[in-house]
């Protein structure tokens, strides 16, 4: 049986909330909002708060602010904790005005697995004027991965294109079973 994987992203819809970048206990935005999608364990001190930049219906899965930090309801986090405990980290966050508990979901692994032949890949070039980026991914559309490189990992970021949050089919099915809101799955 072939293993299937899916990119998990927010299903953006009118009327839902939009969360901003997390802030620390002093109300300052975190210095590196992209750290939450770096594909490695994090060390965060103090309690973080997520501001609601646009009011609307709360979601069980959201991507927050410029860093697109995945913010999930604890019910969603419990699915990840049960099915992929070695692949995730949870950072508690408070969302102003929300009695429910939420966490930032951090995929702690990053895997070099993008199938460049099957995906629509663009690379930075010298003409772009950013020499430090030459040869790295500029864009990856229609993402496909080489599942042989994934091993037993069920949640991860793709090396070189860390925007993509990838989950295994069993996690997708479990999240659909609990009717979690805000999620879009695209097979990769």
Image: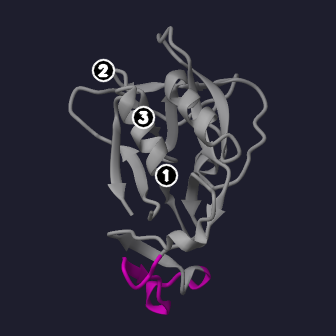
Q: Could you give the CA–CA distance between mark 2 and mark 1, rounded to whole angstroms?
A: 27 Å
The residue identified by callout 3 is: 175
Relative vertical location of residue 46 with respect to residue 69 in this rendering, above or below: above
The quarter of the picture where residue 11 lies is: top left
Q: Which sits in the foreground, 121 or 48? A: 121
Is the Cβ of the residue at disc 2 closer than 8 Å to that at disc 1? Answer: no
User: Mark 1 or mark 3, which has the lower sequence index?
Assistant: 1
User: Mark 2 or mark 3, which has the lower sequence index?
Assistant: 2
Relative vertical location of residue 138 with respect to residue 92 in this rendering, above or below: below
Relative placement, left or right, of 158 versus 144 is: right
Q: Could you give the CA–CA distance between mark 1 and mark 3, rounded to whole angstroms?
A: 11 Å
Q: Secondary structure at mark 2?
A: loop
The residue identified by callout 2 is: 57
Q: Quadrant of the N terminus?
A: bottom left
Of labels 2 and 3, the one closer to you:
3
How many labels sit on residues? Answer: 3
The residue stretch that appears in magenta: 115-132
Q: Counting other residues with Cα less than 10 Å from the Cα at mark 2, is it few (<14), some (14-19), or many (20 or more)?
A: few
Relative placement, left or right, of 37 versus 55 is: right
Q: Indicate whether residue 26 is drawn in magenta.
A: no
Q: Secondary structure at mark 1?
A: strand
Q: Which residue is pictured at 47% across the width and 83% down the height?
A: 124
Q: Which mark is residue 168?
A: 1
Q: Counting other residues with Cα less than 10 Å from the Cα at mark 3, is it few (<14), some (14-19), or many (20 or more)?
A: some
């Amino acid at each position: 049986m072939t293993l299937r994987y899916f990119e998990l992203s927010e299903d953006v819809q009118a009327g839902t909330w939009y969360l901003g970048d997390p802030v620390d206990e002093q109300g300052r935005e975190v210095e590196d909002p992209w750290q939450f999608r770096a594909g490695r364990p994090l060390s965060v001190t103090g309690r973080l708060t997520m501001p609601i930049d646009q009011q609307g219906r709360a979601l069980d899965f959201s991507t927050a602010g410029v860093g697109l930090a995945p913010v999930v309801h604890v019910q969603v986090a419990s699915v990840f904790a049960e099915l992929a405990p070695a692949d995730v980290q949870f950072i508690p966050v408070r969302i102003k005005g929300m009695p429910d508990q939420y966490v930032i979901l951090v995929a702690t692994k990053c895997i070099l697995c993008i199938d460049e032949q099957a995906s629509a890949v663009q690379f930075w070039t010298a003409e772009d004027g950013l020499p430090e980026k030459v040869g790295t991914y500029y864009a990856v559309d229609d993402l496909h991965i080489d599942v042989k490189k994934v091993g037993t990992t069920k949640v991860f970021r793709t090396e070189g294109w860390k925007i993509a949050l990838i989950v295994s089919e069993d996690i997708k099915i479990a999240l659909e079973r609990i009717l979690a809101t805000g999620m879009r799955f695209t097979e990769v």
